[in-house]
Amino acid sequence: MDKKRSYIYILAIVTACCVGVLVMVNTITYNRINESQLASDINDLVKIFPNGEFKEIDFDDNTGLIEKAFEAKGEGYVYKVNVQGYKDTITFMVGFNNEGIIVGYEVLYFNDTPGIGDAVQGDSFKESIIGKFSNDGLTSVSGATISSKAVISGIDAAKAQFNTLKGIEQGDDPIEDLPEVSLGTPIAVNDEILNRYQGEILSETSEGNLTTYHVAVNGYGLVDDDGSHGLDYSQNEYEIVADTESMTLVSITYLHFGDTKGFGDKTMNEGYYATFVGMSMKDYEQEADVVSGATMTSRSMINAIRIVMDALGEWEDE
C-alpha cells in the first residue's frame, strides 16, 4: 500500500511539474506572439507618438469597427480601425492625447476607386481632424462623401471608446458641422418648370448596391441668361450616388460648375448637399430645397436627381 501511495505521489509531482512547464511555455509563447503583433504595428504607431512606449489594451466595441487599441505610456491612446469605403475596406489609425485632443491620423490601407474617396488620405482631410476634441463633430469631404463619412464613423467609434476610458461625458451624438446655407421655397421634384433644365447621364458605374451617375444638366446660363453677366456658360455636371437596394440618394456633389460665380455657386455647399441625402429615388411628389439667390442653379441640381430617378425607374422595370 505504501509503495502504491508513493507512485501516486510521484505521479502527482510529475503532473504538477508538467503543468507548470506548460503554463510557463504558454506564457512565453503568448508574450512573444503579443510582442510580434505589436512589432507589426509599431511602425504605424510611432507616426502618431514618435517617442511612445506602447502596449496593446483590451476594449469593448459594439460597432465592430475598432480592430486594436493601444496605450502610449504617459502620452495617450491609439485606435486601429477598419471601415467600409466606397469600394473596399479602409484601415487607419487615430490617436488621442490624454487631454482628448486628436493628435494623429494615418491611413494604413486604401483601395477605393481613384478620384472617389481618396481625399481621405489627403492633407486637407487630415488637417480637418487633427486638433479636434474627442466630443467634436467632424465634416465629410465633398466628392468623397461615402469614404469620408465611413472614416468619420470609425473615428466616432474610437472617440466613444476613448471617452469611456477617460470618463468623459459623451452627451448627445455630435452633429456634423456643415456650412450654413440659406434655403428658399422648396420645389416638387415633378414640377414642370424643371423640364426647361434639360440634361443627360454621361456615365454610370456600379459597386454592389451603389450606382454612381455622372449627370450633365443645363443651368441658369443655358436657360435664362439675360446677358448681364457676360459669361460663357456650360452645363453643370454632378456626381450622384444612389443605393439601388433602398432606392435612396447617398450623395450628390459637383464635378463641374458652369453657372454664374457669386450666385449659382451658392449651391456648391456641403450643407446643401446634405439636404438631399436619404432622399427617396421613387417619390416624384416630394419637395426639394432650393438655395436663396441661386434658385435656377438649384433647379438644375434637382433635375439632375430627377434624371437619375427616371433611370432607376427604368432599371427597376427591366
Image (cartoon, helix red, strand yellow):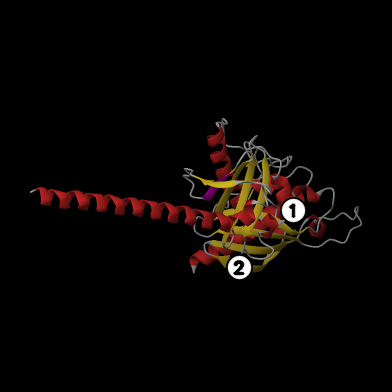
Mark linked to residue 123: 1
Residue 225 forms part of the magenta stretch: no
Residue pushed farthest left?
Answer: 1
What amino acid does circle 2 point to?
A: Thr
At 52% from the left edge and 61% from the top edge, which residue is drawn?
209
Marks 1 and 2, the one that precedes in the sequence: 1
Q: Secondary structure at mark 2?
A: strand
Q: How many marks?
A: 2
Q: Is residue 53 visible?
A: yes
Query: Dot 2 corresponds to which residue?
Result: 205
Residue range of the region highlighted in magenta in the rendering: 66-71
Instruction: Give percent across and percent down for residue 134.
Output: 62, 38
Circle 1/circle 2 CB separation < 8 Å: no
Depth check, front residue: 248 or 179 = 179
197 lies above or below 74:
below
Mark linked to residue 36: none
Residue 70 forms part of the magenta stretch: yes
Instruction: Give percent across and percent down for residue 47.
Output: 68, 52
Instruction: Give percent across and percent down for residue 241.
Output: 61, 58
The residue carrying pointer 1 sits among few (fewer than 14), some (14 to 19) or many (20 or more) residues within 10 Å by Cα, namely few
Name the chief secondary structure element in magenta: strand
At 79% from the left edge and 44% from the top edge, which residue is drawn?
293
At 76% from the left edge and 42% from the top edge, which residue is drawn?
292
